[in-house]
């Protein structure tokens, strides 16, 4: 579920290319997927190179220490491969695997309005934080919010999260406006 989004254009950023590794065009790949090796399951990855869209294909990979080292087809030397350093790697949201009912990708939750059972609008989901115990919604106030507080609300379905409606672009929470966050 740990996936970051590039917002309204329905691109889901899966990782970022790191520095060159060795003399044959290999690169470090900082994967935002969980587990990190899930990024390797995509046949085609997208990026922008010199402000132009570019399709990338990973033709070889290996895990090294706590990260991934990859080789992209056609990038066979350090000079060519270095052009990818710092590039975000993304896929269209339509390429993401379907999830079980009640499960959501982080990019689907970002931007949703958050209201409590009393109808108070807290703001919109700015981002999510992975804490180990549970994910946490970072809710930033909007002009229509009941106050100007940023809230950290645990993503605990059936306890705190009452309903997520992607169609209505809202999350209903069992969370009092006075709770400290």
Image: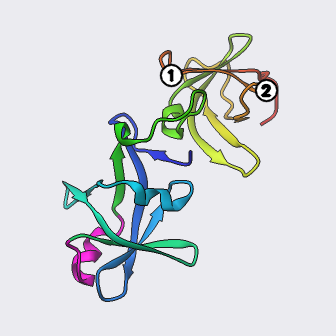
Left or right relative to 174: residue 109: left
The residue that label 1 is drawn on is 166
The residue that label 2 is drawn on is 159
- Which residue reaches farthest bottom? 23
Residue 132's tag is: none
The residue segment tinted magenta is: 74-86
Which structural element holds mark 2? Answer: loop
For label 2, count other residues whose C-alpha is less than 10 Å away and answer few (under 14), some (14-19) or many (20+). Answer: few
For label 1, count other residues whose C-alpha is less than 10 Å away and answer few (under 14), some (14-19) or many (20+). Answer: few
Q: Quadrant of the rendered structure where residue 135 is?
A: top right
Q: Residue 95's spot in the image, x, y percent? A: 36, 42
Q: Residue at x 48, y 56 (%)?
A: 38
- Mark 2 and mark 1 lie on one chain; the one further toward the N terminus is 2
Q: Residue at x 56, y 54 (%)?
A: 34
In three-dimensional space, the C-alpha distance between marks 2 and 1, rounded to whole angstroms, equals: 19 Å
- Which residue reaches farthest right? 179
The answer to whether the residues at label 2 and label 1 have Cβ atoms under 8 Å apart is no
Please say whether residue 15 is visible from this viewpoint.
no
The correct choice, above or below, for 56 with respect to 92 in the image is below
Left or right relative to 125: residue 19: left
The quadrant in which the N terminus is found is top right
Please say whether residue 142 is visible from this viewpoint.
yes
Q: Residue at x 26, y 60 (%)?
A: 56
Residue 99 shown in magenta: no
């Amino acid at each position: 579920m740990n996936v970051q989004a590039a917002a309204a254009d329905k691109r889901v950023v899966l990782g970022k290319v790191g520095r060159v590794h060795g003399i044959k065009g290999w690169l470090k790949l900082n994967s935002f997927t969980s587990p990190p090796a899930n990024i390797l399951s995509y046949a085609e990855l997208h990026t922008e190179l010199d402000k132009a869209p570019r399709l990338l294909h990973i033709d070889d990979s290996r895990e090294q220490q706590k990260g991934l080292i990859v080789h992209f087809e056609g990038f066979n030397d350090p000079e060519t491969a270095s052009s990818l350093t710092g590039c975000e790697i993304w896929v269209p949201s339509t390429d993401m695997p379907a999830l079980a009912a009640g499960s959501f990708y982080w990019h689907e939750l970002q931007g949703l309005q958050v209201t409590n059972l009393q109808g108070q609008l807290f703001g919109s989901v700015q981002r999510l934080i992975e804490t180990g115990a549970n994910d946490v919604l970072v809710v930033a106030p909007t002009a229509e919010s009941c106050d100007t507080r940023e809230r950290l609300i645990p993503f605990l379905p059936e306890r705190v999260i009452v309903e997520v409606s992607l169609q209505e672009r809202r999350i209903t929470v069992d969370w009092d406006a006075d709770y400290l966050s």
